[in-house]
Amino acid sequence: MAVAELKVPNAVNPGAPEPDTPDTLEFGAVQETYLHMVIRRFLKHKLAVAGVLVVLLLIVCALFAPAIAPHDPNAITNTFNAAPSAEYPLGTDRVGRDVLSRLIFGTRVSLTVGFLTVAISVVIGTVLGLISGYFGKAIDMLIMRICDIFMSFPQLMLILVVVSIVGPNTRNITLVLGLLGWPQVTRLVRGNVLSVKQSDYMKACTALGYHVPRKLFKHILPNTLAPILVNATFGIAGNILMEAGLSFLGLGVQPPTASWGNMLTDAQSLTILTSQPWLWVPPGVMIMLSVLAVNFVGDGLRDAIDPKSMS
Amino acid sequence: MFNYIIRRILIAIPILLGITIIDFLIVNMAPGNPVDMMVSPNVTGAALELKKAALGLNQPLYVQYWHWLVNILQLNFGYSMTTYQPVGDMLAQRIGPTMLLMGLSLIVGLLIAVPLGIVSATHQNSTLDYVATGGAFFGVSIPNFFLGLGLIYIFAVRLKVLPSSGMFTLGGNNGIADTAAHLVLPVIVLAVQIAGQDIRYVRSGMLEILGQDYLRTARAKGLKESVVINRHALRNALITIITVIGMQIPLLFGGAVITEQIFAWPGIGQLTIDSISGRDYPTLMAINLIAAVMVLAANLLTDIMYSVVDPRVKYN
């Protein structure tokens, strides 16, 4: 995980009870909505905007991979270990598959694993964090200790062991990364719930006699969404790296399916490392570029959402 | 403060127990058991049953867990399923190189991150700040195996100035200089990862300190800027630095697995990969347990350090 904990105060409360909030300020100036402010501040962050563009480009690559790729990523051509040429812009690998096509199809794996794993972690982590922070007492104690237990294991080591037991393939690593990633989210959400609980509008909710689910999902959750979103963005970057690492070690996406990580596995042999850099440099650069782009987006979001940071 | 430390240790005990339970359960999810791997035409079914009974494998899970736990507490980690050596001995051989690699990387990483983080906070929006934060982003975004392979390609293959794998040169004198040369590349890989993460933390921690009232007071007293930073701000940055060190321990283990694999460094990380490919579950259990216990100990130490360094930490 690139960033473990984020401090994003909830100075702006989009979910607070707001029947009387006027749309305009006293002197008639139009009050900027929270979303507009976030977008305006995000757009100022040039690297974050560049990050969004790169991510969009990658998504297009993933969606239209069959149309963009010059060859079938798994088809064996009549030349193997070929250096880059007009026909095969990034050469062919030792089996004779087109490297560029595999690189384009690899986008699918990285993005799918990155987004899905974070979606799983965020759902589990948010629900547990809401419960833990809102109800407190014994249940909070229990959930927090379970978090402590899971966070004590070095993430990669635990994942490696579980993956080696359940069998390495794309579906399993997605599940394992997703199911082991929730403790960070739980802690983050719990911390936010604890601070939101102290606010006056939560007292108002109680005074109005709102039921617990309404308080949790209509008032507390919207106020913790921003930090969750930032954390999730960094989580995507971290999990793309993790998937690449697992696939590199041979414990992630299995050949013949192309993933950027497993395209680098062969480079552990000295001949490929020395004489065929076109096999391992492009996937490495792609991993770095996509992780960098997602991290920039996360950084931009954090700055845009945090009202305390200077705009 | 003594009471606080005792209380922190008491909280750590159930977590430690939880760690052993999770470790035990995960490895028991593995299909098959040691005896199933002995199945061959020469061994009768009855003999296998006998062996199972002798190993306690037909007992309920909680009884097996209890026996395992009692053994672990006596530092008896069982026997490797691939080398038949005691797991404890294998770990003892491997832990030294890993500690050396992780310790050095942590030191180098911090030596890069702490000064850079502090200077980029005191000179916010300067060129150096942009270079440092930009570099930090590259540090966290570059896959460590890609960086490792790149370094091997440049320094070992092209320039031929540094060795690419192992801890000693074969047939060499096994001297310190030799090991130091072998350490350079893996340490760079891990240190880049650490520095990348820590620069941003130290920077934002320092920025927070710089906005505090006591610094304004110090300036208002007419102190020189260097005194304000060195005497008043840096001392408070110590808290951030302790946090950052504590945070790095679990990440270092993960990084060590991949780095040791690339550089054939004979440590715990490489043993992990070997054990996974050999389905050596007793060894895997022991490695995970030890890593988790070390992380727990690091967290405990971090909390205790807070109370030593920062008198404001309340002990309740």
Image (tube, grey):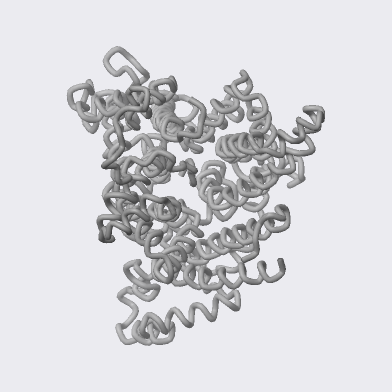
Q: For the point 31% across and 83% down, which residue is it? A: B44
- On the image, the x and y values in percent for residue A106 come to 30, 33
Left or right: A283 in relation to B106: left
Which residue does the image show at 65% across and 64% down from the upper left? B315
Q: Position of residue B214 (x, y in %)?
A: 71, 39
Vertical order, B150 against A151 (above or below): above
Residue at 81% across, 27% down = B224
Residue A118, placed above or below residue B79:
above
Q: Residue furthest top?
A: A86
| In the image: residue B5, left or right of residue A116 | right
In the rendered image of this protein, does residue B160 appear above or below residue B186? Answer: above
In screen coordinates, is B263 left or right of A125? right
In-image side of B10 versus A15 (left or right)? right
The answer to which of A244 and B157 lies nearer the viewer is: A244
Residue furthest to the front in view is A26
Which percent across, then down, holds residue B55? 43, 82
Front in this rendered view, residue B248 or A159 = B248
User: Residue shown at 33%/77% (left/top)?
Assistant: B42
Residue A184, position as x, y percentages in the image: 43, 52
Residue A296 in which image quadrant: top left
Residue lying farthest to the left in this orientation: A67
**Camera sees residue A164:** no
Task: Assign the N terminus of chain B to one quadrant of the image.
Answer: bottom right
Q: Quadrant of the C terminus of chain B?
A: bottom right
Is residue A33 visible from the viewing direction of this image? yes
Q: How many marks?
A: 0
